[in-house]
Image (tube, rainbow, N blue to C red):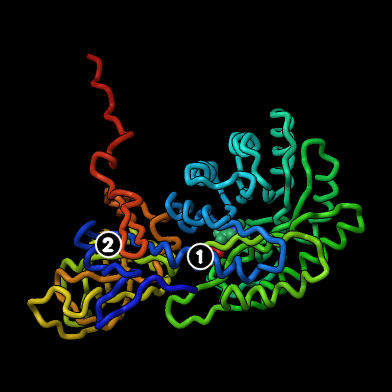
Amino acid sequence: MHHAVSSQDGNLFIESTPLSAIASQFGTPCYVYSKAALSNNFLAYQSALADKEHLICYAVKANSNIAVLQTLAELGAGFDIVSIGELERVLRAGGDPAKVVFSGVAKTASEMQRALELGIHCFNVESEAELELLNRTAASCGAIAAVSLRVNPDVDAQTHPYISTGLKENKFGVDINLAAQVYQHAAQMAHIKVIGVDCHIGSQLVDIAPFVAALERLLALVDELAGLGITLQHIDIGGGLGVRYENEEPPSPQSYMSAILPLLADRNEILVLEPGRSITANAGVMLTQVQYLKSNGEKNFAIVDAAMNDMIRPALYQAWMDIQPISAGNSGSAVAESAVYDVVGPVCETGDFLAKNRSLAICAGDYLCLMSAGAYGFVMSSNYNSRPRAPEVMVDGDQVHLVRRRETIEDLLSGESLLPAAVR
Ligand SMILES: *Cc1c(COP(=O)(O)O)cnc(C)c1O
């Protein structure tokens, strides 16, 4: 995967722009993305699939900034959405609804209506009850809904339990052993057109074997369905390819695809993918500034201006993320000695940390760069502790574009109101 950050004499750059320039122009905390890294990560999938009819549907939830979606739409990407909000973002970004697949366990009738009206490619249906609601909703709109059934192949993705989705115990999809029955039911519905099958077994997978196991189970189902007279046009194997945060060695899209494609040789189904993290994680970083250094004799704390509300991955999944000073000299005046720090934020929670036990030579005022923050970063941020959300910046060579401004206190309070004055 293409990494957004490079180092020259200890000074960090994103493309040809120094991170120090971005920190001083936009303040901290601040998310920064590289347009080239985003594009290259998408193109890696595209070129690995040059010889196979395919549709790459970027998983919008990983990073839904409309400039990110625009960059990918211009390269021909489709999109995997999980809400109508994400679909409206895709439209705003110039994405093609005909290349959208709609995932998620709890789609509402009004979400279905809007998606039908826009003519999305496919609904990835996760239960029989959803299928029935979709059939009724399509009938009331006078539409036919194209459907893929999300099956749960019962494969262990060997990843963190919170991001493992393909086991029987998970809430996602239909048990693969019950799927044929559901397909037969679907095939009889007047406003449903069965076109595919999909699965998504988890996120941050660093091994190819679970992907292969899941696809083998899907193919057995597709063949069983063909025997029942139900022919599918596409096979969607979801997203989930991992990235390097620390020392993981995930396969490249190229080697992932070279393990998958032989299984699809001599088959006509279109291959659909839903990569999220592997496109955006290493295309982005988050900048933060050290406010205070503090020691209690046993532990050193670097208290920074970014918190779990800005980046929740360490707090939520015990995720390890690299963190580095953005310049060798940094604040300049004082000469920092290296020490081992917990890097913590201002939020009133013990779980509020970005990194633990890191050797850093830093002073108050220095800027730090949290690496690999382009996926599941800004999108999971909140206003907890009434903290306005950070801005997002897209770097394109030496050009720097603000693609979401920092929230203001006014933004924070808009939408709230006081109770009316008491009537006496
Ligand atoms: C989250 C998700 C993805 C993307 O997963 P990544 O690990 O970010 O690649 C794809 N498909 C579905 C259905 C998802 O829920």
Label 1 environment density (alpha carbons within 10 Å; few <14, some 14–19, many ≥20):
many
Q: Position of residue 186 (x, y in %)?
A: 80, 45
Marks 2 and 1: in contact by CB < 8 Å? no
Ligand 1 - quadrant of the structure image: bottom right
**Residue occupying image coordinates x 86% and y 52%:** 230
Q: Is residue 294 something that shows in the picture? A: no
Name the residue furthest top: 424
**Residue occupying image coordinates x 35% and y 66%:** 285
Of the residues shown, which amino acid type is indicated by label 2? Answer: Ala
Q: Position of residue 196 (x, y in %)?
A: 75, 54
Mark 1 and mark 2 lie on one chain; the one further toward the N terminus is 1
Q: Position of residue 95 (x, y in %)?
A: 54, 47
Q: How many marks?
A: 2
**Residue occupying image coordinates x 52% and y 82%:** 249
Q: Which mark is residue 279?
A: 1
Of the residues shown, which amino acid type is indicated by label 1? Answer: Ile
**Near-viewer residue (145 or 267):** 267
Name the residue furthest left: 333
Q: In screen coordinates, is 54 left or right of 316? A: right
The reply to whether the residue tagged 2 has its Cβ within 8 angstroms of ligand 1 is no
The reply to whether the residue tagged 1 has its Cβ within 8 angstroms of ligand 1 is yes
**Which quadrant holds residue 29?**
bottom left
